Image (cartoon, grey):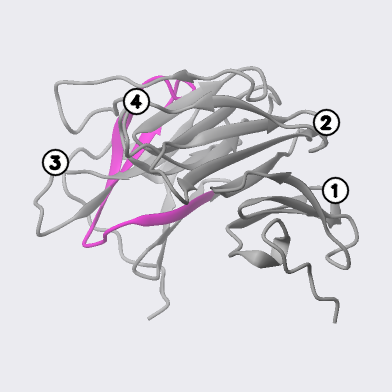
Amino acid sequence: DNPLYNDQSSLGSTRLMGFAVHPQNATDIYVVYRGLSRTKDAGMSWEVVYNLGDMMFEGIRYNPLDTQNLIAYTNEDMKVNKNSKVYVSTNMGMDWSRVYGFYASSSTIVKDVVFHPADKNKIMLYGDGIYASSTDQGHTWRTIGEEHLNPDMGIIPSASLDGLVYDKRSPNVLYGSDLTTTYEADSPKIRLLRSVDGGLSWNTFYVIDNTILVKSMSMCDNLLAIVTAQNEIYLLDVDEVASISPVTGDAVLTPYYDLQ
């Protein structure tokens, strides 16, 4: 009942790419598109906060431990194929600054940012061709990762990660996922990775057979939930797997729920 503006700088002029809801105030919402817009009244009115013109924002996240801190990132240039760029705000979106440009390769794509569950300063960022960390709320970043001779062990800085999540029970433990190319091309598998040193080094933790891509990951206590591009949901008890031993070969995990 309240149409948005209809010019090229407005919220309604292009497709929406993502949104972030304030952790303590559900009426305060940011949306990203070819810019940033914000509503403070659950969508009744909007204001354009930032307009990049030809650059398309891909995502935005509130820091749950410091809601003055937001991270937004771009992945798409409407005219020129450029790499992802990251923007940070430390005053709840009133001002933004570009803090990191990924120029390592033309295919670098940020997929998401992940916040440390206990330290507001620590943030992880991952995607295609990039895996980086920040210890100052996103103002500066460094690429991390380790390369191993064994293709089943670890990830490298140019890894293509499809998911990343902290184990809140032990913040030094993280789980990630990638579609590894070390397995047969006609039988793709998702490799679940585990780090016990805050993401500096990784090992293969589990392998999901007969699936192609992780769309999202989340954790509740000991259960790791994995949603795939095949509309399947997997639940993995990480404590049970860890008590046996990390899996470095093929393993089959049956979908908990198949949306098909």
Q: How many labels sit on residues?
A: 4
Residue at position x 73%, y 39% from top?
64
Residue 243's x, y, as percent?
A: 37, 37
Cα separation between marks 2 and 1 = 16 Å
The residue where tag 3 is placed is 182
The residue where tag 4 is placed is 104
Camera-near label (4 vs 1) is: 4
User: In this image, 141 relative to 52: left or right?
Assistant: left
The residue where tag 2 is placed is 91
Q: Quadrant of the N terminus?
A: bottom right
Q: Which residues are magenta?
A: 191-218
Of residue 76 and residue 188, the one placed in the foreground of this image is: 76
Quadrant hosting residue 255: bottom left
The residue where tag 1 is placed is 24
- Most common secondary structure along the magenta stretch: strand
Residue 90's x, y, as percent?
A: 77, 28
- Helix, strand or loop at mark 1: loop
Residue 156's x, y, as percent?
A: 29, 26
Do the CB atoms of the residues marked 3 and 4 lie less than 8 Å apart? no
Camera-near label (3 vs 2) is: 2
Other-residue count near label 2 (Cα within 10 Å), few / some / many at <14 / 14–19 / ≥20: few
In the displayed structure, 9 sits above or below 155; it is below
In the displayed structure, 81 sits above or below 8; it is above
